[in-house]
Amino acid sequence: MSTKNTQTSADAPLPVLLPFRIEPTRLGTPRLAPVHAVLIGAGLALLAGTAWAQADAAQLSPLDVIIKWAPLLLYGFAFNILISMIAMALGTGAGLGVGLGMLSENPLLARVCWALTQFFRNAPWLVLLFFVMFLVPFQITVFGVRIPLPDWVKATVGFSLPVMANVAEIVRGAVRSVPSTQWEAAESLAFTPRQTMWQIILPQCVKRMLPPWMNLYSLVTMATVQASIVGVSEMLTLTAQVHTAEGGRPELFAPLYGFALFCFFLYCYPIDRFTARLERRFHIR
Amino acid sequence: MAAATDPRPWTPDQPIVQLIDVHKSFGTLEVLKGVSFDVKKGEVICIIGPSGSGKSTLIRCINALVPVTSGTILVENIEVADPKLDKLALRRKVGMVFQQYNLFPHKTALQNVMMAPIHVLHQDKGEVEERARALMKKVRLTGKEDSYPGELSGGQQQRVAIARSLAMRPDIMLFDEVTAALDPETVKEVLFTIRELAEDGMTCLLVTHEMNFARDVADHIYFTDHGVIVEHGPPASFFSAPSDPRTREFLSQVL
């Protein structure tokens, strides 16, 4: 082989020899514009329309089916919202505790909270959900009083665990992002560390925590449909049941699930926009 | 050891701050290599010297923001280096103002001034507010009570920081290069406030690069270099006839 040949092959790198790289992905929900909603809606309508055109004229149109079942489906959707809100509330409360625990001067507490956060942040939500569903009994007895634990309560607890871990990380990051000079100033004014945290540091963190927290809420809301896998009567479960009740007609598949998509989109999209606006506003200041 | 746990009662004729052979190391880097001096009540002390000479560390040791490696610091006969020290009790006596103001950005100017007396000293809110308004007037910021730190200029923020510190009614004020981050025009207003404080009889320790101010206001000047006090004296003799070559070189560069 001549030198010239080697040179050319060196100049033009062989694709197979290039190192494999995973492109870094941006965390968080993808940003959607209203035009996407219109496109998706139009696509679904077209799909449903063609399907229906091939169907028996005696049957209800997809639109009529949706209107007929809308109260039930919306009831299911309200259940998704309820689960997401309770899970978020529980997770935020616990996450605040765990996040502050990670920052504790007590090394044991800090380690335990760190481990908790890492464990629940790096576990698939569905696996956590299964664990809670099958590990927690259907009722507990406290001081002789039987408290039933329906499936949806267990699912809510299951969702609150990853929320807790993510909130803990948000809290830790926000507290760390406050300049250490704020601690110094408070120290020199004879504030105790606890007072400094609650009076001076955390109030400044709220602004920094709000956008990621709302982003997390959006994710939780969308994740609640996973509860259908463990039999909670939320929107996705009900949609499947409605589909079966209508004879499992294939042309109803897209409109019914499209309706579910549409509901989630209508709910999560404004949150997403609002988060983006907050992020922009806080960046400027 | 008995003196550390049960300090002799302090009387105003004794030094209010006393440093005896103070050493401070950060890892292997020795920042203070045996610093000793006394400050009498009502005195204004200026500490000058090239950057990295340990001035800021020295002043931070006095209110226990930075723990000393060895040596003794007495503030009103309280041993600062005592591990059992009640740091909060010490910091109620010693106010501190920082180069970067370090105001609490989520509180208004007035709230910044009121926070520590209310939460730390548990004083009556109405009384604290009255005092805070008086302090805002004293630093000539009447009308800026409800502004947030972000809406104030550097000089105004620094004066709020001074008022915030004074609200704790300290016996000693520490100023750590408080004009270093300011525009030349606003330096004057802050120095004016400090001068008034000094004239009111407040014991002040300043780390500063404002030589003219030090000459006018200080009772005593300390020049530090590489962690030791190279030279000290009253401003008149210090500036007109420095004896050490390092002082002469430094003064020739900054004057």
Image: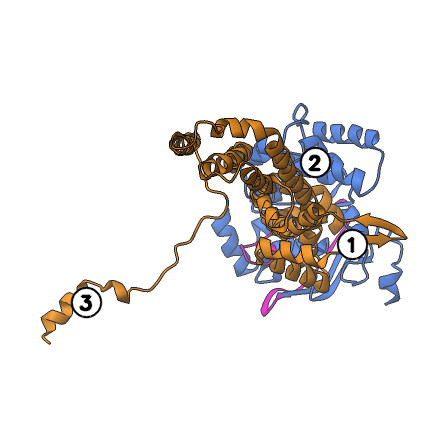
Q: Chain of mark 3?
A: A
Q: CA distance from mark 2 to mark 3?
A: 66 Å
Image location (x, y in percent) of residue B161: 66, 38
Give amino acid for label 2.
Answer: Asn
Q: Residues within 10 Å of mark 2 (few under 14, many from 20)?
A: many
Image location (x, y in percent) of residue B165: 72, 40
Q: CA distance from mark 2 to mark 1?
A: 21 Å
| Pointer 3 and pointer 1 on the same chain | no
Q: Is residue B27 magenta?
A: yes
Camera-side mark, 2 or 3: 3
Q: Chain of mark 1?
A: B
| Pointer 2 and pointer 3 on the same chain | no
Of residues A157 and A252, which is closer to you in this image? A252
Label 1: element kind: helix
| Contact check, label 2 and label 3, Cβ < 8 Å | no
- Numbered disc total: 3
Q: In the rendered structure, which segment of residues is drawn in magenta?
A: B26-55
Quarter containing the N terminus of chain A: bottom left
Image location (x, y in percent) of residue A6: 15, 71
